[in-house]
Image (cartoon, grey):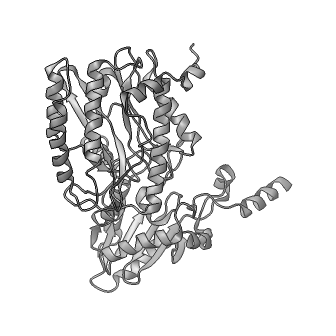
């Protein structure tokens, strides 16, 4: 009994897990984000669900939309934004002492004062109150529109494009066909509150998330630095006979060592022709002498990630053709980078870089004409200014037909293909548009062939801690 009383007293005094650290984002930032949503929905309502509890054996991670607007890390929560009063209400499950005896104190409806202080919410209730609060709004006709994210939730290692693909595969299976959590919520709302006009919040929230605040940029910058440190250690650890998955292990060690609990996306580590597959994930082959190895990997650092890729020779020495192809990619990266600034469009950047690279290409020597043709084809490809990066690796929003604006974060990914040899060469960095130009978060990461060869002469973690074999 004495032990039980001690535990209950300790639990009551402990700070519950799941409330955002104010050093990451203060309440004022969450209020500013929600104010933009209020402006977008007008006199309507918006309902944003949090993520469900994690499957057994997995660590819970909140959905991006819910975390972006509340900073709360607890399952089965909801956020209601009332555009008529601009009032924010958060709904959470109640405290479960038996559950907390296993996992420790978790933020709950009983922590209303802490939640209001952390994110500036007006009211906090238990989840059971949500239906009671939605029902009376329907009395007056027509009821205000109710905005709900129609797009699937983004969670751990999940971007919307991947989530949509998974849902399509499930829908194609006659023995599956499960809907997303957001899809299930929409079905419940239609059945329980049919007078509401349900509208899609995703197209309104995406542009808000596209432009990052200074604090968001600092998170992506740190995630990019950790990704770069992991790549450096992987480059050091590479030698013929190493498995692709062992470079994954090296990177994860660096992630955890530097405070990144999750991966931003599954690692892509492809030696030789495995690199040809853009999202190769098996990572099961051994690295071979004479091949290049591609590594595309970044951590999830406090709900923000990066997208960094490098390629290097497995044996530590570039062949003349490998050196020439990598020199082309590196020069293309610099040609793109120096043209990015506010007020310029992606097409203007691509057109200017292409003209510069057509002149540069004439200075390169290749042993095969197919390599030159691959480089020429790369200059016609329009996807080198690739995609937004933020809470997911393929973040929401679009900038392709707009002028660059300060606060936009995206990946620069010059690449080329040699289909005759299943050869794929690329280099990827994440940049932020600043008031005067651009910041490359991984400009410290070696990219020049000479610098990579020098780095590979250093011993890596795999050489210092040899794996055991059965």
- Pinpoint residue 74: horizontal percent, then vertical percent: 54, 58
In this rendered view, identify the residue nearer to me: 37 or 29.
Answer: 29
Seen at 49% across and 36% down, the residue is 230
Seen at 26% across and 20% down, the residue is 321
Going by the image, does 103 lie left or right of 160? right
- Pinpoint residue 355: horizontal percent, then vertical percent: 15, 43
Q: Is residue 86 visible?
A: yes
Tell me the quarter of the image containing the C terminus.
top right
- Pinpoint residue 14: horizontal percent, then vertical percent: 71, 60
Tell me the quarter of the image containing the N terminus.
bottom right
- Pinpoint residue 15: horizontal percent, then vertical percent: 67, 61
Where is 201 relative to 429, above or below? below
Where is 421 relative to 342, above or below? above
Going by the image, does 348 lie left or right of 1? left
In this rendered view, identify the residue nearer to me: 356 or 193.
Answer: 356
Residue extending furthest toward the bottom:
140
Which picture quadrant has residue 397? bottom left
In this rendered view, identify the residue nearer to me: 221 or 167.
Answer: 221
Where is 467 relative to 373, above or below? above
Q: Is residue 50 visible?
A: no
Q: How many marks?
A: 0
Where is 356 relative to 31, above or below? above
Seen at 50% across and 44% down, the residue is 262
């Amino acid at each position: 009994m004495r032990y039980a009383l001690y535990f209950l007293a300790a639990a009551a005094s402990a700070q519950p897990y799941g409330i955002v650290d104010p050093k990451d984002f203060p309440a004022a930032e969450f209020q500013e984000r929600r104010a933009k949503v209020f402006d977008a929905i007008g006199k309507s309502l918006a309902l944003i669900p949090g993520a469900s509890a994690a499957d057994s054996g997995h660590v819970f991670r909140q959905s991006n939309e819910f975390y972006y607007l509340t900073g709360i890390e607890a399952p089965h929560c909801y956020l209601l934004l009332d555009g008529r009063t601009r009032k924010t209400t958060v709904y959470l499950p109640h405290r479960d002492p038996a559950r907390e005896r296993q996992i420790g104190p978790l933020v709950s409806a009983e922590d209303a004062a802490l939640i209001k202080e952390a994110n500036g919410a007006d009211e906090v209730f238990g989840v059971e109150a949500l239906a009671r609060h939605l029902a009376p709004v329907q009395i007056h006709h027509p009821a205000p529109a109710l905005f709900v994210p129609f797009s699937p939730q983004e969670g751990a290692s999940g971007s919307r494009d991947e989530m949509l693909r998974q849902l399509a595969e499930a829908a194609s299976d006659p023995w599956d066909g499960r809907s997303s959590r957001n899809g299930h919520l929409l079905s419940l709302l239609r059945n329980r509150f049919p007078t509401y006009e349900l509208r899609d919040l995703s197209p309104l929230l995406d542009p808000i998330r596209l432009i990052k605040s200074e604090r968001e940029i600092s998170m992506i910058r740190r995630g990019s630095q950790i990704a770069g440190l992991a790549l450096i250690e992987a480059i050091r650890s590479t030698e013929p006979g190493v498995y692709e998955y062992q470079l994954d292990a090296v990177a994860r060690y660096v992630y955890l060592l530097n405070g990144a609990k999750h991966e931003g996306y599954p690692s892509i580590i492809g030696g030789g022709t495995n690199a040809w597959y853009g999202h190769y994930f098996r990572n099961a082959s051994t690295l071979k002498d004479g091949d290049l190895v591609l590594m595309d990997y970044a951590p999830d650092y406090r709900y923000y990630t990066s997208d960094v890729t490098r390629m290097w020779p497995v044996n530590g020495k570039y062949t003349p053709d490998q050196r020439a192809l990598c020199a082309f990619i590196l020069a293309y990266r610099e040609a793109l980078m120096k043209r990015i600034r506010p007020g310029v469009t992606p097409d203007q950047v691509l057109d200017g870089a292409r003209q510069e690279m057509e002149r540069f290409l004439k200075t390169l020597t290749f042993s095969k004409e197919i390599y030159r043709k691959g480089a020429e084809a790369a200059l016609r490809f329009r996807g080198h200014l690739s995609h937004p990066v933020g809470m997911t690796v393929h973040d929401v929003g679009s900038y392709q037909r707009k002028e660059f604006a300060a606060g936009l974060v995206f990946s620069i990914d010059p690449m080329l293909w040699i289909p005759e040899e299943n050869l794929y060469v690329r280099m990827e960095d994440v940049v932020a548009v600043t008031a005067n130009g651009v910041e490359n978060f991984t400009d410290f990461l070696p990219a020049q062939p000479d610098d990579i060869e020098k780095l590979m002469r250093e011993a890596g973690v795999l050489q210092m801690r040899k794996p055991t074999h059965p």
